[in-house]
């Protein structure tokens, strides 16, 4: 019982924490973000397993996490209103070469992040070459290039 | 699902997005309060947690943590003015049921478990200030009551809270 409760508590806490810190919180922009993710994983592991290193405990914890994931995906299907609450919504941040300042300020993104995504995926050089940039629910920025 | 002004087929939801930003701002405040409270010791080990039952110099005073954690060792320091020869400390039995005693320093010369109390006896040579250190680990969460009485009649009662 203990292991199941631990897994549920940690799952809930992480879900809430990542919703509070926003879509970009761990989008792995820098190498340090990756390191931070590892450290969080390490700290979480301790809390999930306690000092019980048996295989059955690991199985219980993993099964509980997978089950929660499954339940949430089913619930989202039955009740679509819950989808944005759990997973947020996508957001247009560049509209026909124009950076939407108020939106990117709220999401703590700047021009360089948008341009980096444009370079990376489409080899674009300037903001005007972007038709749309969308901050996806995953925290990534997707780019639709302007028609030539 | 198109709700934005663009011709992009995207289920953008400005109302929800606005609400989400408000929620996040409020969440940041909660997060900050949580971290500050943790740093101050609201969840164990820190100035808010460290406490004592009486001023130093009293015939019996105990240093303890108000907030402890399940499965994590914390320390009780019992300061007592001991008579020459032998000192007896009587503690409530519940304390021993909800905590695992890791170490008692110095080692008691005898320990007697009664219906409601546990007596710890120590050999004191000359008498005077005497310190007993208990390293204990809570076995359950919630409130943990503790009371200590010396053979001289001085009593210290306190309560700890163990986080899950």
Image (cartoon, helix red, strand yellow):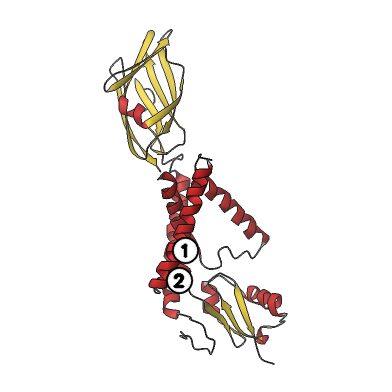
Check disc 1: other Cα within 10 Å, few if <14, some if 14-19, many if 20+.
Answer: many
Q: Nearer the viewer, residue A100 or B93?
A: B93
- Chain letter of disc 2? B
How far apart are the alpha carbons under marks 2 and 1? Answer: 9 Å
Across and down, in percent, residue A101 comes to 55, 79
In the rendered view, would you say B27 is above or below A88? above
- The residue closer to the viewer here, A86 or B24, is A86
Q: Are marks 2 and 1 on the same chain?
A: no
Q: A102 above or below B55?
A: below
Using the image, tell me which numbered label, if any, was put on residue B21: 2
Could you classify mark 2 by the number of other residues whose Cα lies within 10 Å: few (under 14), some (14-19), or many (20 or more)?
A: some
SS for tag 1?
helix
Instruction: Identify the residue at image location x=61%, y=53%.
Output: A38
> Could you tell whether B92 is left or right of A91 in the image?
left
Q: Return the chain for callout 1.
A: A
The residue to which callout 1 is attached is: A20
> Residue A100, how many percent across, how many down?
55, 81
Q: How many marks?
A: 2
Judged left or right of residue A60, residue A26 is right
Q: Residue at x 50, y 44 (%)?
A: A56
Write the residue at 38% across / 72% down: A78
**For residue A29, which numbered disc appears in the image?**
none
Q: x, y percentage for residue B146?
A: 32, 29
Counting from the top left corner in percent of width and height, residue B131 is at: 43, 20
């Amino acid at each position: 019982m203990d292991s199941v409760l631990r897994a549920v508590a940690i799952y809930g806490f992480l879900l809430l924490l990542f919703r509070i810190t926003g879509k970009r919180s761990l989008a792995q922009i820098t190498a340090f973000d990756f390191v931070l993710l590892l450290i969080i994983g390490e700290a979480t592991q301790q809390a999930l397993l306690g000092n019980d290193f048996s295989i059955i405990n690991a199985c219980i914890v993993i099964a509980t996490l997978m089950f929660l994931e499954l339940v949430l995906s089913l619930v989202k299907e039955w009740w679509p209103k819950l989808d944005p609450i759990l997973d947020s919504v996508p957001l247009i941040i560049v509209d026909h070469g124009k950076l939407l300042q108020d939106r990117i300020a709220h999401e703590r993104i700047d021009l360089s992040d948008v341009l980096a995504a444009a370079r990376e995926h489409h080899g674009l050089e300037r903001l005007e070459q972007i038709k749309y940039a969308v901050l996806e629910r995953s925290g990534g920025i997707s780019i639709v290039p302007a028609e030539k | 699902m198109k709700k934005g002004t663009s011709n992009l087929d995207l289920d953008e939801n400005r109302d929800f997005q606005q609400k989400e930003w408000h929620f996040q701002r409020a969440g940041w405040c909660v997060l900050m309060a949580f971290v500050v409270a943790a740093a101050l010791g609201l969840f164990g080990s820190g100035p808010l947690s460290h406490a004592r039952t009486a001023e130093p110099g009293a015939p019996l005073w105990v240093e303890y943590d108000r907030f402890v954690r399940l499965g994590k060792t914390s320390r009780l320091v019992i300061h007592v003015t001991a008579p020459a020869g032998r000192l007896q400390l009587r503690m409530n039995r519940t304390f021993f049921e909800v905590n695992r005693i890791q170490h008692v320093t110095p080692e008691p010369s005898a320990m007697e478990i009664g219906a409601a109390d546990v007596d710890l006896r120590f050999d004191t040579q000359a008498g005077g200030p005497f310190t007993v250190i208990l390293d204990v680990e809570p076995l359950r969460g919630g409130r943990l009551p503790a009371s200590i009485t010396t053979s001289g009649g001085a009593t210290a009662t306190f309560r700890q809270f163990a986080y899950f």
